[in-house]
Amino acid sequence: MPAHLERNEKKMATIAAVGSILLWCASGVCFARGARLLGPMAYLTLMTATGVITVVLLQRFRGQPFADLLRLPLRVMVAGFWGVAFYTVILALAFGIAPERAIGQVNLLNYLWPVWIVLLSAVLIREKRRLLPTAAGVLLGFAGIVVARGPAELLRAPENPLPLFLALLGGFLWACYSVLLRRWRIPAKQGGTAFHFTLCALMAAAVAAIRGEWQSLPPVGAEALFWILFGGIGPVGLAYHWWEIGVKRGNVPLISTLAYFIPIGSTLLIGLLFREAMGSGLLFGAVLIAAGAWLAGRTQGSKG
């Protein structure tokens, strides 16, 4: 391939990855807004079903046979059940049941997953890292949660601790899944996005039935339809597709660095749509978490 065409392909792939980062910034807003319109599990069912259709169509457009979407190693199926399907269900539930002023904290607790990845990588795959920068990054991440909660709230029990716990657990499960995929050396094309989000839709539909959300489902108006389509086509469908293009053909160091801004971008979007959620320390806490994740994620090496 001529050099100028190769540079252009790399540029377009990088732009695609940036698009996926921007879409993922909107995930929390989708969960929070959709839950308030339809109920958290009913919304998640409809959103992920839309996402699965999008992923299948994109894969078919790329010439990948439908059977390949289901041809996954058993351990990837099991890990994906916990690390993708169950993670997404409990995260959507956390956003759905959290009071508006706690939505930002729920969002940031989920975004501790890069910090969990660093800690789990050391335990599960014996990844060697420089001790001081790694420790500083981990401490910065947890300090971000303290700052986001605020000094006045820190010593006071939360009004409803369940959504905070679910968000923390969700981020931990996603980190476990990510580290296990690295340990097992699973190729990106065998990630199983369509399969795992199909499981997610089925699980969410069952939980919605248990919670009585289908019986009380309001008419799906224009706003609810927008969030279903945007959430399914965007953060679930296109984002994963564009990300795969970006990490395979784009400027990976630049893409990896920009990905650390997702907690900041998602916090800003939540603040725009849910003013009550934007506490004084929330954005600064997001910056600390992003900085901690960047520092901890950049400290691979052989020195202890």
Image (tube, rainbow, N blue to C red):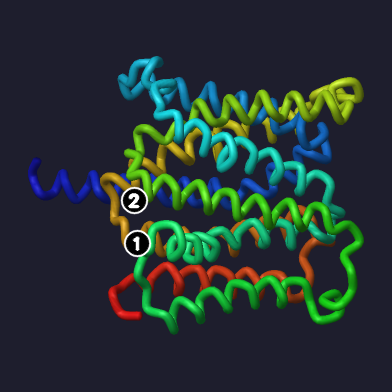
Q: Who comes first in sequence, dot 2 or dot 1?
A: 2
| Residue 170 point in image, percent of width and height | 65, 50
Q: For the residue carrying disc 1, how many other residues have a C-alpha within 10 Å: few (<14), some (14-19), or many (20+)? A: few
Is residue 83 shown left or right of residue 243?
A: right
Q: Horizontal placement of 304 versus 279: left or right?
A: left
- The quadrant in which residue 188 appears is top left
| Quadrant location of the N terminus in the rendered image | top left
Residue situated in front as seen by the camera: 248 or 171: 171
Say which residue appears at 41% left-offset and 40% top-offset: 242
Q: Which residue is mark 1?
A: 254
Residue 4 horizontal side relative to residue 241, left or right: left
Residue type marked 2: Thr
Could you say where residue 250 lies in the image, as x and y percent from the top left? Answer: 29, 50
Count of marks, rendered view: 2
Numbered mark located on residue 14 in the image: 2
Circle 2/circle 1 CB separation < 8 Å: yes
The label on residue 25 is: none
Q: Residue at x 60, y 62 (%)?
A: 112
**Depicted 268 relative to depicted 224: above or below:** below
Mark 2 neighbour class, 10 Å CA radius: few under 14, some 14 to 19, many 20 or more: many
Q: Secondary structure at mark 2?
A: helix
Residue type for callout 1:
Leu
Viewer-proximal residue among 174 and 228: 174
Q: Secondary structure at mark 1?
A: helix
Q: Residue at x 40, y 16 (%)?
A: 66
**Left or right: 24 with respect to 224?**
left
For the C terminus, give its image quadrant. bottom left
Q: Nearer the viewer, residue 160 or 258?
A: 160
Looking at the picture, how far across and down is residue 49, in whole percent?
A: 62, 24
